[in-house]
Image: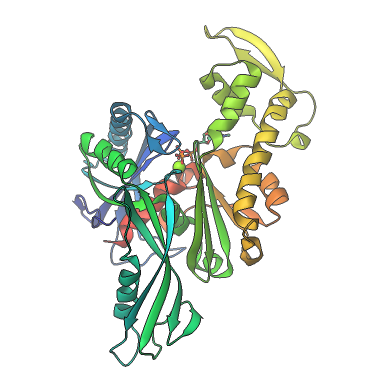
Amino acid sequence: MHFGFIKDVTAKNGSIVVGLDIGSTKICAMVAEVNPFKSRDENNSSTNIMGVGSAPSKGIKKGVVINIEQTVEAIKEAVQRAEEASGVDIKTVYTGVTGSHIGYISSQGVIAVKEKEIGQKEVDMVIDAARAVAIPFDREILHVVPLEFIVNGQDGITDPRGMVGVRLEAKVQIITGAASSIQNLMKCCQKAGLEVLDVVFQPVATADAVLTRDEKELGVVLVDIGGGTIDIALYKEGNIFHSAVLAVGGANFTNDAAIGLRLPFHEAEKIKRMFGCSMLSLVRGEEEIGIENTDGKPGKSITRSHLVEILQPRAEELFGLIKEEIAGKGYHKLMNAGVVLTGGAVLMEGMTVMAENILELPVKIGSPIGIGGHTDILNNPAYAACAGLVLQGAQEI
Ligand SMILES: Nc1ncnc2c1ncn2[C@@H]1O[C@H](COP(=O)(O)OP(=O)(O)OP(=O)(O)O)[C@@H](O)[C@H]1O
Ligand SMILES: [Mg+2]
């Protein structure tokens, strides 16, 4: 889907862009000022954060709206906080969609080339031809990923521009989402008084924010482990060629801790964030954790190793599922730049080491490139997705 670009209030020195990340754990609105005359680059950012507001997510499960009223309230709260932090009156936003409703269709397009050489116009035309397939009425196209171009029968071409030929073909992957999920998301924004100018496939926005051009060229996997979903996007030769959304995430750790330790979810969440670790081998000694009763008075105590014994098998399972997506199809051999992790769940101690052990690839935590201001927020992997939405908007100014 493409609704245009977000250009809200025009500020003194540029334009304002607002990214709205409607996650399963938190809803985050990020307001940034974009200087359209400066190019985005690693050391010299043209986009600067003016303020961020977030609110606990309500009404969203595994990335999908399950309660409109609750989601609207949570969006309003996040937006109001971002308005207070930035001093900007937010009217339009740029948002993303993910969830297990995301589907993939392979397609092909062909055109006759009339010009002397193939240019951007012909590339756009052949991609348009490939996207003109029958999409079920309950699906919407989010993204068309060119996988390969074929010029006069010669296949394996990643960029046909500048080439000579009379017949141009494109093989693409069309990423679709359930129309109802996308429309519900938009409806929540509209009910919160916001105009949605574009909805993108969230992993693409996050990947564009945190991956360098070199990483995308060499081969890299972006893995965003949020609260209710894991988004996976694989890049090679500069382009995304595979993606997947798994309906699991950080909330599974909290559930396991809540059940295993017989605690309410919010208490288990607090303990997990403070003392959680994905690997028992990293826990030294018999550290005791005091748990508060509901009245705030000290209650029972547990050992940290007991907590980690509960969390480790879940971490192994999640990285096992991620490995299946990468290695199961033989893609790991192409991933020369390794794995970049984002999402709040990777903040848990031991996640990077476990990812390296299980995925057998170099792993690092990614932070957004080419966006400045509020470094504390930009260094937090839970905000990479929202920064990605801002940068998507900034591109279109
Ligand atoms: N310090 C921490 N230690 C462990 N886990 C953490 C920490 N901080 C956040 N998390 C976990 O990260 C998850 C939330 O991550 P994030 O904010 O990226 O999710 P989201 O974008 O709201 O959800 P999704 O992308 O799945 O819709 C939660 O499960 C939360 O418990
Ligand atoms: Mg998220």
Q: Quadrant of residue 24?
A: top left
Q: Position of residue 138 (x, y in %)?
A: 31, 47
Q: In the rendered image, is residue 271 in sight?
A: yes
Residue 373 in sight here: no
Q: Position of residue 36 (x, y in %)?
A: 28, 63
- Quadrant observed for ligand 2 in the rendered image: top left
Write down the quadrant of residue 72 in the picture. top left
Q: Position of residue 45 (x, y in %)?
A: 40, 60
Q: How many marks?
A: 0
Of all residues, the one furthest to the right in this rendering is 285
User: Image point 31% across, 38% down: which residue?
Assistant: 82
136, 357: nearer the viewer: 136
| Above or below, 328 relative to 67 | below
Q: Quadrant of the N terminus?
A: bottom left
Q: Is residue 227 left or right of residue 174?
A: right
Q: Position of residue 380 (x, y in %)?
A: 50, 43
**Toward the viewer: 353 or 14?**
353
Relative to 348, does residue 38 appear above or below in the rendering? below
Above or below, 236 against 344 in this view is below
334 horizontally vs 244: left or right: right
Figure colour scheme: rainbow
Residue under the image location 39 percent in, 64 percent down: 40
In which quadrant of the rendered image does the C terminus lie?
bottom left
Identify which residue is drawn at 73% across, 28% down.
309
Instruction: Name the foreground residue: 284 vs 241.
Output: 241
Which residue extends farthest bottom?
A: 116
